[in-house]
Image (cartoon, coloured by chain):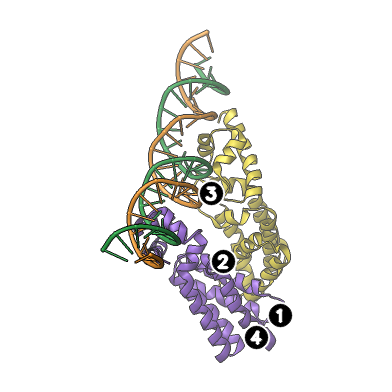
Chain colours: A purple, B yellow, C orange, D green
DNA sequence: AAATATCCGGAGAGGGTCTCCGGATAATCT
DNA sequence: AGATTATCCGGAGACCCTCTCCGGATATTT
């Protein structure tokens, strides 16, 4: 990969991060390219679809959350791990506008798949909690993911923000117990 | 209102219903107008924004649900009423594509406000259940609405459909008890 | 039948997504 | 260094969408 190509790619990423932070995940790709000082073609060459771009933008955040899941899996009790991780997901969703959207929009064939990564991180936590016995055994990983991202999405779009988010999460977590 | 205007309006509504049923709530308004055999201007005169159109399309459905809420309020126990009504909302959301979206998108100043109507219908059910004592007193009407429409949205967009929807709903309802 | 109020159609501005290819630029070879 | 090659960039442009505007057509009233 040529150095100018790599430089453009990085610059596009930081610009996208900024624009998405202020306009949300549906920001104009045209404008991102313009602000980055490149043509539209350059953007689309590096990031063929919006999902690929979003995935690249939020990749490190998602990886942080996955690492956190692994850590909790090793050092915390099953129930608490699930609760703490959900809270972390929520916190990131509230911080980074558009993050929730990129978690739900899955299946970025090329590049990084946020949806798959998050789902697989959650799988470990859910299965262990279910083995332990205090979590409903009939919910599957898709259910869990749907609930958590649903709360995250709601919380990131409603202005009422953090306290409402915590309340919704506590309702959901309570519902997961049996 | 002139009779041709009324006729066009009705025709637009039925066409919109069909197109939204097959393409979802983000269908092209242009195409709806084209299929209805009118110009774009005519569509926008009758329905200034997409939300107004969606609200008009789903108005009777929403009114049915509101009536159902009133009925349950009068003839069923608080807990059961809440559960049954949520299940009905879910059923409608699964039947009519785009219905969930029109429930969440609120504030159609002109015409009919699906969001407000649904929220006020749910208010009665929630308050009564909370007075009865088996429902968490700290959740407010926005929380309830967010949870129910969240499940509905998820269920209407995931292909796995009905059984998953019921499972998610039962988790949420369990979480609402105390 | 004439006058008036109302409504329609479609052209078109403005913006968005995405493609394509001639020209420019980096990397490699001699 | 100079030439060759592989790679990449820019932006014009096709196509679609939303939304507006107004001359002409249509209904209603006088």
Q: How many marks do you count on the picture?
A: 4
Q: Secondary structure at mark 1?
A: loop
Please say if the residues under marks 1 and 2 sit with CB atoms less than 8 Å apart. no
* Quarter containing the N terminus of chain B: top right
The residue that disc 2 covers is: A104
Q: Residue B95 lies in what quarter of the image?
A: bottom right
Please say if the residues under marks 4 and 3 sit with CB atoms less than 8 Å apart. no
What is the x, y in percent for residue A134?
Answer: 67, 86
Q: CA distance from mark 1 to mark 2?
A: 23 Å
Question: Which chain is mark 1 on?
Answer: A
Q: CA distance from mark 4 to mark 2?
A: 23 Å
- The answer to whether tags 4 and 2 share a subunit is yes
Q: Secondary structure at mark 3?
A: helix
Instruction: Report the front residue among D27 and A49.
Output: A49
Q: CA distance from mark 3 to mark 2?
A: 24 Å
Q: CA distance from mark 3 to mark 1?
A: 40 Å
Q: Secondary structure at mark 4?
A: helix
Residue B85 as seen in the image, left or right of residue B120: right
Question: Which chain is mark 4 on?
Answer: A
Label at residue A137:
1
The residue that disc 3 covers is: B51
- The answer to whether tags 4 and 3 share a subunit is no
Q: Secondary structure at mark 2?
A: helix
Q: Is residue B1 above or below residue A77?
A: above
Q: Do we see residue B83 in this rendering?
A: yes
Q: Do we see residue A133 in this rendering?
A: no
Residue in the image at 56% along x and 48% along y: B112
Instruction: Report the front residue among B53 and A94.
Output: A94
Label at residue A128:
4
Question: Which chain is mark 2 on?
Answer: A
For discs 3 and 2, the disc positioned in front in the rendered view: 2
């Amino acid at each position: 990969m040529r150095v100018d190509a790599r430089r453009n790619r990085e610059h596009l990423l930081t610009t996208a991060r900024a624009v998405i932070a202020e306009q949300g995940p549906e920001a104009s790709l045209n404008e991102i390219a313009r602000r980055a000082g490149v043509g539209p073609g350059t953007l689309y060459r590096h990031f063929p679809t919006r999902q690929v771009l979003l995935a690249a933008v939020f990749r490190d955040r998602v990886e942080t959350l996955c690492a956190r899941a692994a850590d909790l899996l090793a050092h915390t009790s099953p129930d608490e791990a699930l609760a703490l991780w959900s809270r972390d997901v929520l916190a990131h969703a509230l911080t980074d506008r558009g993050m929730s959207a990129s978690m739900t929009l899955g299946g970025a064939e090329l590049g990084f798949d946020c949806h798959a990564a998050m789902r697989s991180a959650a799988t470990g936590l859910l299965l262990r909690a279910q083995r332990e016995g205090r979590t409903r055994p009939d919910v599957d990983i898709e259910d869990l993911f749907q609930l958590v991202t649903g709360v995250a999405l709601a919380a990131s779009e409603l202005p009422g923000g953090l306290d409402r988010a915590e309340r919704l999460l506590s309702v959901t977590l309570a519902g997961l117990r049996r």
